[in-house]
Amino acid sequence: MRLRFGLLGTGRWAAEAHAPALAAAPDAELVGVWGRDPAKAAGLADRYGARPYAAVDDLLAEVDAVAVALPPDVQAPLAARAAGAGRHLLLDKPLALDVAAADEVVTAATDAGVASVVFFTNRFRAPVADFLRDAVAAGGWDGGRATILAQVAGGPYGDSPWRAERGGLWDVGPHALSLLVPVLGPVRSVAAAVGPHATTHVLLGHAAGAVSTMTLSLAAPDAARTWEVVFVGRHGWASVPSGGDAVEAYRRAVAELARTAVEGRTDHPCDVRFGREVVAVLAEAEAQSRGASADRR
């Protein structure tokens, strides 16, 4: 069964990852595009042989699922709306920018019984999926460290208001948590502080006793840029593979959503419930870091 998809969003990520992956995926048919800029929606739809829609509800009436490539504060209410219409959800990270909004999406998806996947990019790269499977099976991990230091100024996402406001914690923090939590378990305690270059340092206590750290920034100096996620335990050190094609990863996410929907299931390791779990950790880290900044003053 091929899911008929509507794409919500017309920005660079929608045009360069979501749309080409949906158009090429054997499990999907891209039938419609909606965006806040009608001209961009028309251009993107024409590029992939889809139809532009002026109204979200008109698009929802014609599809089985929606793929959302919008800022998280715009994504969350539209995702809840789509779920309420009985549409399966393929969403971007983070699910929302606060727990209340994330809860609304979870409630809508649960009540409607729709399948959902949040696209934490690395979780859908085959080498990473294999690594996580083996790491979980091995067990015995005492902790982990995620260091993701990037620089978005001057790049393709440099004009993103929500990234400028919420920083690396909310943009790359979800990537880190999507790798740490499956191996080390749910987060039970959070401490955080902000350092130079808008770098958020987070200390996480996991349910089974493991401890991990995250060091996250979107304003790192050129020489400091890095992407590293490692685990340590009785087996020694293990590094998560990095790199890979985002379009191929997105095609895998499409396939997994389609399979979940066809099987009549609503559970997936990266579903909206996991997305909500990630949002809760980020929100607590943000609150902790603000408190630490106030204490320093």
Image (cartoon, rainbow, N blue to C red):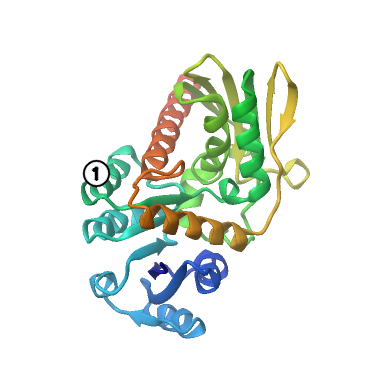
5 vs 146: above or below = below
Q: Quadrant of residue 261?
A: bottom left
Residue 149 shows in this picture: no
Instruction: Name the residue: 44% across, 56% down.
Output: 259
Along the line of sight, the residue nearer the viewer: 30 or 173: 30
Report the number of discs. 1
Task: Name, please, the residue furthest toward the right.
Answer: 223
Identify whether 234 is placed above or below 168.
above
Q: Residue at x 43, y 31 (%)?
A: 281
In the image, is residue 99 above or below residue 264?
above
Pick the residue in front: 46 or 217.
46
Could you say which quadrant of the image residue 153 lies in? bottom right
Position of residue 144 in the picture relative to residue 106 (left or right): right
Query: Residue 131 is drawn in which quadrant?
Result: top right
Coordinates of residue 77 in the picture (x, y in percent): 28, 54
Task: Give whichever of 239, 268 is nearer the camera.
Answer: 268
Three-letter code for the amino acid on which mark 1 is drawn = Thr
Pinpoint residue 235: horizontal percent, then vertical percent: 73, 20
> Residue drawn at (37%, 45%), measured in percent from left and top?
272
Q: Position of residue 273 (x, y in %)?
A: 36, 40
Q: Secondary structure at mark 1?
A: helix
Mark 1, other Cα within 10 Å: few <14 / some 14–19 / many ≥20:
some
Q: Who is closer to the viewer here, 273 or 254?
A: 254
The image shows residue 189 at horizontal and vertical percentages of: 45, 19
Give the side of residue 50 with respect to residue 240, left or right: left
Q: Which residue is mark 1?
A: 107
Q: Is residue 132 visible?
A: yes
Identified at 56% across, 42% down, the residue is 175
Q: Quadrant of the N terminus?
A: bottom left
